[in-house]
Amino acid sequence: MIRGRSSIDLDRSRFDDLHDRPDPRAYVHRLTQLSYETPHHAQRVVRATITERASAHGGDPFTVLDLCCSYGIKAALLNHHVTLAELYEHWTCPDAQTLTSAELVRRDREFFALRRRSDAVPVVGVDIAGNAVRYAQAVGLLDETYTENLECCPPSRHLRRAMAATGLITVTAGIGHVTWRSFETLLRCAHVPVWVSAFVPRTVSYRPVADRLARHGLVTRADPGRTYPRRLFTGPAEQRRAVERALRGGHDPSGLETRGRCHTRLHQSRPSTAWAHIGTKS
């Protein structure tokens, strides 16, 4: 994921030592230990959002930009006939552990090619973890990748070109490591209507991002009554911090963070005309 000194969630446990390996095996092994499930929830949500955006804007083709894309797990779920549980099994099974990274890339390229959906959409990935994004592009999960820290640097000419065709920005693990600055620099490059789908930890305020998106004509909505389990806490210290932050944010942690799991809330940002279009169809 994109990380930097501007991170606003420094109390959250991090996995930097696993995040930029040549392949995802060690990272995924840790995720399975923590029952990490946000990509599972995002699979359904993002597919539905793509359909809704196409309907609201005349069916014109567009690119999805995955912010903090890591090894391309979300793109794998979005564009392939595979579940998160199957991906975890694929990367943690005994056979996978005997391969070199180069051998795993060849194996995974074939694995995903055989499961490619007919309605797959172009996905661009942005993340400062160079090894992770190189793996994701090498096996065909991401069409383009950019190792750029948008918190401190303007986008490259090539990323600006990719953003010009982007109609949906998604983020499932990065809010707290990226701030409104990354969204601002991306939206300045937009040439078509952009929607944003973000799974935001309840320990982080999304208000600064939503306020910045509003300056670009995007209205943000979130269902206050629904949360999505993210993963187990890494230990009592992280749980204690999460409960305290949830309370400071005006959330009730009872039965959620107090039960030992991080939780996220889905925030959807769209032009007001798009929300009106969705309303007429419901």
Image: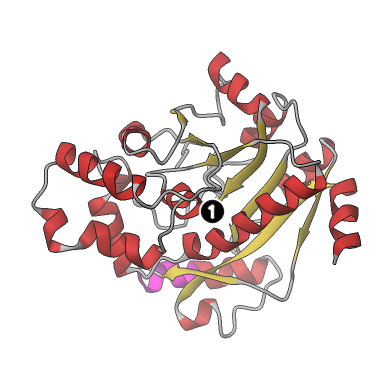
At label 1, counting other C-alpha atoms closer than 10 Å, the crowd grade (few under 14, some 14-19, many 20 or more) is many
- Picture quarter with the C terminus: bottom right
Q: Residue at x 76, y 39 (%)?
A: 212
Residue 239 inside the magenta-drawn segment? yes
In depth, the one of 59 and 49 nearer the eye is: 59
Above or below 194: residue 155: above
Judging from the image, what secondary structure is the residue with disc 1 in? loop
The stretch of residues the image draws in magenta is 235-241
- Picture quarter with the N terminus: top left
Q: Which residue is mark 1?
A: 172
Q: Residue at x 33, y 32 (%)?
A: 134
Instruction: Name the kind of residue labelled 1 in the image.
Output: Thr
- Pick out the residue farthest to the left: 98
Residue 173, position as x, y percentages in the image: 50, 52
Residue 3, position as x, y percentages in the image: 46, 39
In depth, the one of 107 and 98 nearer the eye is: 107
Helix, strand or loop for the magenta stretch, by majority:
helix
Determine which quarter of the picture holds residue 180: top right
Residue 137, position as x, y percentages in the image: 37, 34
Above or below 231: residue 132: above
Answer left or right for 105 relative to 170. Answer: left
Residue 182, position as x, y percentages in the image: 61, 34
> What colouring style does the render use?
secondary structure
